[in-house]
Amino acid sequence: MGLLQKLAIKNYTMGGLGEAIGARIGGIGSHSGIQVTETKALSYITVFSCVRVLAETLGSLPIFIYKERAEGGNDKARDHPLFQILHDLPNDEMTSSTFRETQMGHLALSGNCYASITRNRRGEVIDLYPIPWNSVQVRRNKTTKKVEYLVTDNSATEVFPAEKILHIPGFGFDGLVGYSPIRLASEAVGLGLAAAEFAARFYSQGMAIGGILEHPATLSTTALDNLKTSFIEKGAGLANAHVPIVLEEGMKFNRIPMPFTDAQFLETRKFTRDEICGLFRIPPHMIANLERSTNNNIEHQSLEFVKYTMLPYITRWEQAINWKLFTPKEREQGFYAKFNVEGILRGDYKSRQEGLAVQRQNGVINADEWRALEEMNPQPGGTGEVYLVNGNMIPVDIAAKREVSE
């Protein structure tokens, strides 16, 4: 077993995605005072929710291997070695969905995801293992000018050629490595983390009894000790928020309220939440923010999520797979991989059936193809293979001849 497989297995043994990004050393400072890293950002619920939406959406999409027909169209290539690896089991330890969820989580957080490619003697891919993104360094060889990958596990480092690594980069300027969204947006993420920490400390440190103590003279040592015991030990914390306090030597307590609304605290948290949604291009309703969502626009927002958020990622995945996992000969023969996004593009049942009916009436699909989309078996005897068109429709050239004759 090579270094790549050992590193992948070690990563999953340690706990998967969280541990994979947990080894990142250092971070980006922010003016909020929070040191921002991918690990810490994932503890912020808005970041976690957005990354989870991206990862689970890609992991739930079916991916198939197709072969182009010489006469046009394509067929599923179920007998191709890659079909089972991409659709079912990329290796002996995880399903295709788990593999793609993990990789997409790495990509969304760090801007890159990596997987080792193992081939047999015939050059066929036999397994794919995810590699922690923080263990990989991409460089260009000074002699050959080719891209290579340095993979480090503790003190052991190996150099792998590009053909042995499936690398899917996100947005970046050099075409080799993607940028980390978390580090580029460290101020917004840091503000969200700081606000969450402030809210937690607001309750845990007894802000409910904040105020000023007035004493008519000098406070004695005994009275000061009693005061500390009363306020700090018995008065702090949410459980003691309404416990009465005994004051010493004629002291008076004047409460200084600090409601969250006066500090615009809730507005700040909402604004930061929307900023993070914008960073990942996630519609707010997908992370349980329904303030601006209605029954009329939520379906269109979901369609826009597929078109403008997932489609760029899907395109990156498909092109990387077609480039790295197929041989040049297989690409010439017309083999390619493609995700099926039909499931998440479906509208409500009535609209879907009306759209299929239009295709059926215009000869685009036959009855068996319609039934297949609805997970139904073909009609017996081949009766569902016939393509039909509306009887009132005639070719344009025939209509033109009729007009001339009239």
Image (cartoon, rainbow, N blue to C red):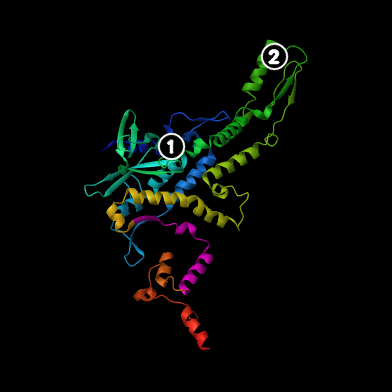
- In the image, taking residue 328 as reference, residue 368 lies left or right, namely right
Neighbourhood count class around disc 1 (C-alpha, 10 Å): few under 14, some 14–19, many 20 upward? some
Could you tell me which residue is drawn at 53 percent across and 54 percent down?
304
- In the image, taking residue 378 as reference, residue 354 lies left or right, namely right
Q: For this rendering, which residue is in front, 14 or 194? A: 194
Residue 257, image x, y percentages: 71, 30
Answer whether residue 337 is magenta in the image: yes
Residue 233, image x, y percentages: 62, 22
**What residue span does the magenta drawing correspond to?**
336-361
Could you tell me which residue is drawn at 52 percent across and 85 percent down?
403
Could you tell me which residue is drawn at 52 percent across and 56 percent down?
303
Q: In this orientation, does residue 43 appear?
A: no
Q: Look at the picture and state if 188 lies above or below 391.
A: above
Quarter of the figure that contains the N terminus: top left
Earlier sequence position, callout 1 versus callout 2: 1
Residue type marked 1: Gly
Residue type marked 2: Ala
Q: For this rendering, which residue is in front, 264 or 249? A: 264
Neighbourhood count class around disc 2 (C-alpha, 10 Å): few under 14, some 14–19, many 20 upward? few
Q: In this orientation, does residue 79 appear?
A: yes
Labelled disc at residue 18: 1
